[in-house]
Image (tube, grey):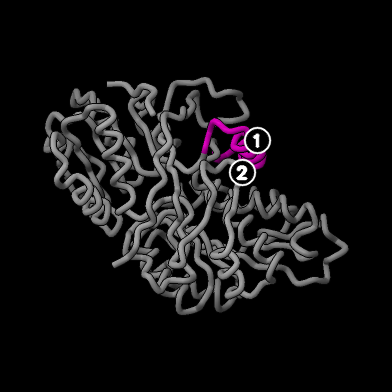
Amino acid sequence: MRFRLFAAVAAVASLVAALGGSSAFGGSSAASGSAAASPVKLGVLTSLTGNFAPWGIQFRAGAALAVNEINRKGGVNGRLLNLSVADDQSIPNGGIDGFRKLTQESNVVSVGGVVGSNVGLATGRLAEQAQVPLFLLRAGDDTILTLQSRYTFRTCLPPAQEDGPPILDLAQSRGVKSVGAIVADYAWGQAFKRALQDTFQGVSGIKLNVQVAPLPTTDFTPYLRALGNVGMIVATGHPPGGGAILAQAGQLGMKAPVIGAYSPFTLTAKAAGSSAYGRWADFKCMNVGSKAYRALATRYLRTFPQNGFFEDEALQGYAYVKIVAEAVGKVGSDPKKIAAYVHANTFNIPGYGFPLKWTAWGEMVGPTPILTVLTKGPPPNAALNKAGDWWPRVLAKSKPLTPYRPG
């Protein structure tokens, strides 16, 4: 079944070169007149090793690109930006150690890049205690934010409870009678399972079957067989299991399209190859059809060709730096004032599919995720994809999602 139109770690040396030769990930000789001014330190806490490294590597590079561009123009009010980077190793303890190091030793004004929900649960609490803004890259567990949260912000992936309705809308628009899902057995996967069950409960004419597999799983055939003859498969939370699920479904003769949830296209293309074309779609925050995205992607791949493709995660790294830099330019480097500025303003980031604005507790206001299908290339031009002969094509844009209100 085909989609139709309807509504490992990047080299440190490369990052240093991209940032003008600074070993602190952010110095530049472009603003020598303000060399005496103290730099503004932004923290990157993300997965550079472990299961979620592909996500974190892209985020770090996108943040580095933004820092480089800002510093080349003289910094923020004459102050250069520096990135202080910590690897959370894709585990909660790594996130806790990294957050404390960045905030207590490096004295960063903000932290961004958390991927895993387990890490997000641990560091979200720390951010609120320390009163330092924390920008989540993924971490979609719906319990990370509470109504009292004031320093934790989502930047793309909505909480799990907001991710169910677009899946249902897609199934209904395609006339699908049965939906199968394979989720990972950790905080995000369990939250996503609850979200799907809540969303599909009481909906007539569509049967839902959710299978939970351990996070390290690589052989998904038992879970695929348990789904039976479904009309659509949802695969999320198994880095890089989305592509593996797609490829193994094909080996079993299953023709249903596979829907991901914010997984890098490069992972899927590498794991599934040409079998992914027309069958793998994913929800994204980037608008690959926009001129702004393509211009930014060209600059990114000129600087980081080894990363292959300008993923959603890299765009979020870029957005993180641009948002904090704007806040610093307006209110200074006090983390409390930065958080207040972020809450009070709307940010239009080049390449994003929607403006970024937040509720009082840090959920995005009215995000409109874009459903994008992986297709056989070529890309619009060679500068836009160095990872292979494929290109994501926009299928549809979600209705604005209602911000999840924690209980």
At 45% from the left edge and 79% from the top edge, which residue is drawn?
129
Few, some or many residues within 10 Å of mark 2 (<14, 14–19, 20+):
many
Q: Are marks 1 and 2 in contact (CB under 8 Å)?
A: yes
Q: CA distance from mark 1 to mark 2?
A: 9 Å
Q: Is residue 285 left or right of residue 196?
A: right
At 78% from the left edge and 64% from the top edge, which residue is drawn?
77
Residue 350 numbered tag:
2
Residue 310, percent from left and from top: 55, 39
Q: Residue furthest right?
A: 33
Question: Reading the chain from its start, which is encountered first: label 1 or label 2?
Answer: 1
Question: What residue did someone put label 1 on?
Answer: 295
* Prevailing SS of the magenta stretch: helix
- Residue 291 visible in the picture: yes
Look at label 1 and name its amino acid: Ala
Element class at badge 2: loop
Few, some or many residues within 10 Å of mark 1 (<14, 14–19, 20+):
some
Q: Quadrant of the N terminus?
A: top left
Element class at badge 1: helix
In the image, which residues are magenta?
287-307
Q: Is residue 299 left or right of residue 115?
A: right
At 42% from the left edge and 29% from the top edge, which residue is drawn?
395
At 52% from the left edge and 37% from the top edge, which residue is drawn?
287
Residue 199, percent from left and from top: 23, 47
Reply above or below: 19 against 119: above
Reply above or below: 119 against 222: below
